[in-house]
């Protein structure tokens, strides 16, 4: 009887040899092997988002970017797709910093890590970092609004002086249409404590606040921004020229960081804000 079944039904013979039920084979056969359009779109959006981030986006960032574009994607599903397509995030490990408690003699730490701001133009944060460009260092000053964590002013120079930080502040002040009642927070760098920069703050009627010396956590949002820029966008060997660095910085801030990249702070407080630059 079994031999007759094997002769008449080759599939039955295979199932018999493999020790599986024919019903399992029929179920597999009836299941559609074609990928749905929604799944194709999801996979495409994940690949596009990862490419836009220059390989820096992890599962959380990818899920945020894709979901913002109208395609629902959980962090777990994003992680699974990253493994499926061998997409790797190039993020660095966390670093422990030394804590100190020395405030500036004239400028107190008024902000005191109160980074949750309910409205725009209440607290701006600024900082300066260095970037290798060709055969020398390039200095980048950036200002963000704590309300939506968007960059509202920046400047690039070959010298880390008060002129550099002043240009970034003036850009932010102009873009935000000369707001009143703003607090500006930074570290104790000489380009923020100088007479030139403090006079500019006085002219704009902006209150100044400063981190404690050597305490990066007092200006954590700015530290986070520079960490994101250097791990997500800047080549490991630096840029080849001043012009290349300038273009890359502008592209990162205007087109990627402010418009595409999701900010976990905004997600956590369920806040939706338009692009501010």
Image (tube, helix red, strand yellow):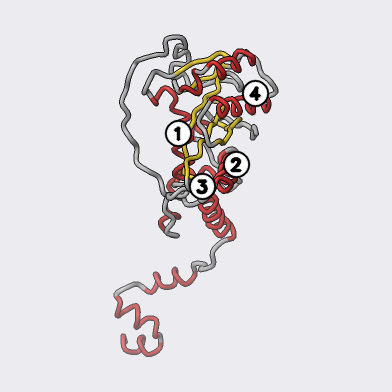
Pointer 2 and pointer 3: residues touching (CB < 8 Å)? no
The image's mark for residue 250 is 2
Residue 140 in picture, x, y percent from top left: 52, 35
Q: For marks 1 and 3, give the one nearer the viewer.
A: 1
**Disc number at residue 27?**
none
Q: Position of residue 237 (x, y in %)?
A: 43, 50
For the point 56% across and 13% down, the residue is 207
Asked if residue 113 lies left or right of residue 67, the reply is left
Q: Which mark is residue 173?
A: 4
67 left or right of 98? Answer: right
Residue 155 placement (x, y as % from top left): 58, 33
Q: Report the quarter where the N terminus lies.
A: bottom left
Disc on the earlier residue, 4 or 3: 3
Res 196 → quadrant: top right
Look at the picture and state if 143 lies above or below 27: above
Of helix, strand and loop, which one carries label 1? helix
Task: Identify which residue is drawn at 39% across, 26% down.
Answer: 216
* Front residue of 142 and 120: 142
Q: Residue at x 34, y 78 (%)?
A: 15
Q: Read off the residue under disc 3.
A: 73
Crowding at label 1, few (<14), some or many (≥20) Cα neighbours within 10 Å?
A: few
Q: CA distance from mark 1 to mark 3?
A: 25 Å
């Amino acid at each position: 009887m079994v031999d007759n079944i094997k002769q008449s039904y080759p599939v039955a013979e295979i199932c018999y040899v493999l020790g599986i039920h024919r019903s399992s084979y029929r179920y597999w056969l009836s299941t559609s092997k074609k990928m749905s359009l929604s799944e194709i779109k999801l996979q495409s959006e994940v690949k596009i988002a990862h490419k836009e981030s220059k390989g820096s986006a992890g599962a959380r960032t990818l899920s945020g970017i894709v979901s913002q574009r109208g395609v629902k994607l959980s962090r777990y599903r994003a992680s699974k797709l990253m493994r499926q397509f061998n997409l790797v995030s190039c993020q660095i490990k966390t670093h422990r910093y030394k804590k100190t408690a020395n405030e500036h003699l004239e400028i107190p730490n008024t902000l005191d890590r109160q980074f949750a701001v309910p409205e725009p133009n209440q607290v701006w944060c600024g900082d300066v970092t260095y970037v290798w460009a060709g055969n020398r260092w390039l200095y980048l000053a950036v200002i963000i609004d704590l309300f939506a964590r968007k960059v509202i002013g920046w400047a690039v120079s070959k010298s880390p002086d008060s002129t550099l930080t002043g240009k970034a502040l003036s850009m932010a002040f102009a873009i935000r249409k000369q707001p009143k009642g703003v607090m500006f927070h930074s570290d104790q760098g000489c380009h923020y404590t100088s007479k030139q920069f403090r006079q500019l703050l006085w002219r704009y009627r902006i209150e100044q606040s400063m981190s404690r010396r050597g305490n990066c956590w007092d200006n954590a949002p700015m530290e986070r921004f520079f960490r994101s820029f250097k791990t997500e966008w800047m080549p490991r060997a630096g840029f080849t020229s001043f012009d290349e660095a300038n273009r890359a910085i502008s592209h990162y801030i205007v087109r990627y960081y402010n418009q595409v990249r999701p900010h976990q702070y905004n997600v956590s407080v369920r806040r939706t804000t338009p692009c501010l630059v």
